[in-house]
Image (cartoon, rainbow, N blue to C red):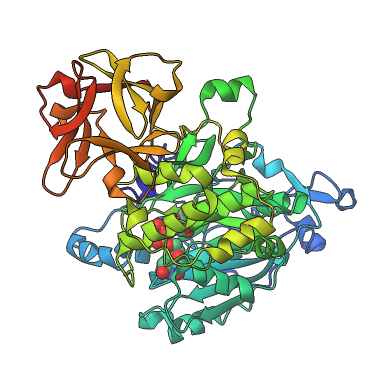
Amino acid sequence: SRIRSKASFPSPVLQKAIVSRTRNEIDEGLRPAGINLTAKAQPAEHKQSHAKVLVPEDHGMHQVLKIDVTLSPRDPKAPGQFGRPVIVPPGKEKEAQKRWKEGNFNVYLSDLIPVDRAIEDTRPAGCAEQLVHNQLPTTSIIMCFVDEVWSTLLRSVHSVLNRSPQHLIKEILLVDDFSTKDYLKDKLDKYMSQFPKVRILRLKERHGLIRARLAGAQNATGDVLTFLDSHVECNVGWLEPLLERVYLSRKKVACPVIEVINDKDMSYMTVDNFQRGVFVWPMNFGWRTIPPEVVAKNRIKETDVIRCPVMAGGLFSIDKNYFFELGTYDPGLDVWGGENMELSFKVWMCGGEIEIVPCSRVGHIFRNDNPYSFPKDRLKTVERNLVRVAEVWLDEYKELFYGHGDHLIDQRLDAGNLTQQRELRKKLKCKSFKWYLDNVFPDLKAPIVRAGGVLVSVALSKCISVENTTVILEECDASSKSQQFNYTWLRLIKHEEWCLAPVPDKGALKLSTCDNRNSGLKWLHILTSVFHPDLVNHIVFENSHQLLCLEGNFSQKTLKVAACDSMKLHQKWKFEKYYED
Ligand code: UD2
Ligand code: MN
């Protein structure tokens, strides 16, 4: 369905061979907050470790975090260790199946895997040697959750604690979005109390992930906000490359490469390099690989930062003050979905940048369905969110969003009050969506109308021409102004500001003032044959009882609507140009 952006996720690639690890072993000791790992934080300890420091500290930079090579997983033989796939033990299949729905992934296996398991260091070669500034800003990690599975929530937190330089983590804010599960109350409080940096913020009612993140942001004390989902595993050295980008420019929003924690066997899988976050109409997020020839021609390296038209949404670092300057998220967005589009457009159009940082990698459990309930209908919630985004940010291109949807939601859906969001856009002096398309996402196909030029009768080779407030058939003349029509995404047949419409109950035609919401003006020009193979090239008007088709009569130079008939050549039409693929 249109809102499951993850369907377009590229096949979660090459599970990397499990190599035996002699260097850079990941620390698997349950390491409570308070142990420093970097040269910056604790130079003395760092010198003792085996990690090499290439550049002395006074040069102002240091290498990204290396985990002390002398540390090794507590239990190297434990299931899932090093990110290996796990198999449900014989006889336990039923139980595993039963527990699947607790999180819409293999919860049974997750519970078998150590909460601090090691995973492969999947970074491209060169990342471990990269330098970052000593003066990196601190960050608050914000993790919202609603009824998250115990073991995955813990694994998320441990991966942050164990694989981040201590001094950069101001706090880990767990925002409990009104969970119903008992274990997420006292038991969680007690468990997390061993980690002084972990704070739990409990919301008194369900906020949805967007407003839950905002609650987290309002309570954060770090310089940078780093948002994470509650079922992730941060990989070695994940944090510093993100903060480095924000440090270089406070208007950079830095995203890690999102890798895949397999929902069935819980293995940690890497993904292809050179992927950008993009969207396709009607605003579905997806990843698209930069074509190999572009990579070659521009000598793009695997470690190079990638500019992204949109972010996936869940995992990113943003300067806290900048986030508030941008007006945060639209707080009118409900529960789930669309907020990644909103923030992406806002950042780009209002002077910022969104980047994927290949040296930062975080695994995430991609699931086929949300494991929690939506207070209202799920589809409607997401569509409403997207309508808010479209109405505020897409300018004239919003028609492409509506036109690609399954139905014309702008007519029915109350997206709520948008005044504040529109004023914010003005106040921030943000650029147009056209600018965004030209400069940030030039490869998006976004023709402003579907078809245009002269409208030719296939059988008669004559063209429709405007005469007073109606239309007639004439010799075609592509240069004639009165023969120019556009077929819009909202299904209007437009001549300048006038729209073609049937006169109700008469069969005759007229030109009326255009109105995107008036169904009395909407035509379906069928170009492909999926639903109505018999009506390809027809121009169909649907009234309450039947399908009417635009029909030409050359001897009388007239046009009318009549019952659709797939055999009638007089009902077949072609525009001069079609802008879709
Ligand atoms: C993706 C994003 C996710 C968010 C989402 C909506 C990634 C990896 N994930 O879907 O972060 O941007 O798209 O556009 O990019 N949650 C709440 N309250 C709610 C619903 C969810 O706290 O009412 C939490 C949830 O427990 C999870 C996070 O919000 O930690 C994201 O939800 P998700 O994992 O269901 O979203 P996902 O990964 O399908
Ligand atoms: Mn998620």
Q: Nearer the viewer, residue 46 or 572?
A: 572
Identify the image quadrant of the C terminus.
top left
310 vs 353, left or right, is left
> Where residue 515 sits: x, y (%)?
38, 48
Residue 499 seen by the camera: yes
Which residue, as the protein is rendered here, is positioned at the far right?
58
Q: Nearer the viewer, residue 332 or 56?
A: 332
> Residue 488 occupies which quadrant of the picture?
top left
> Where residue 438 sits: x, y (%)?
60, 34
Which residue is at 50% across, 72% downward? 212
The image quadrant in which ligand 1 is located: bottom left
Residue 50 seen by the camera: no
> Where residue 189 sits: x, y (%)?
50, 83
> Where residue 34 sits: x, y (%)?
68, 72
Which residue, as the protein is rendered here, is positioned at the far bottom?
186
Which residue is at 30% across, 43% downward? 521
> Residue 497 occupies which quadrant of the picture?
top left
The relative height of residue 44 versus residue 307 in the rendered view (above or below) is below
Which residue, as the protein is rendered here, is positioned at the far front?
468
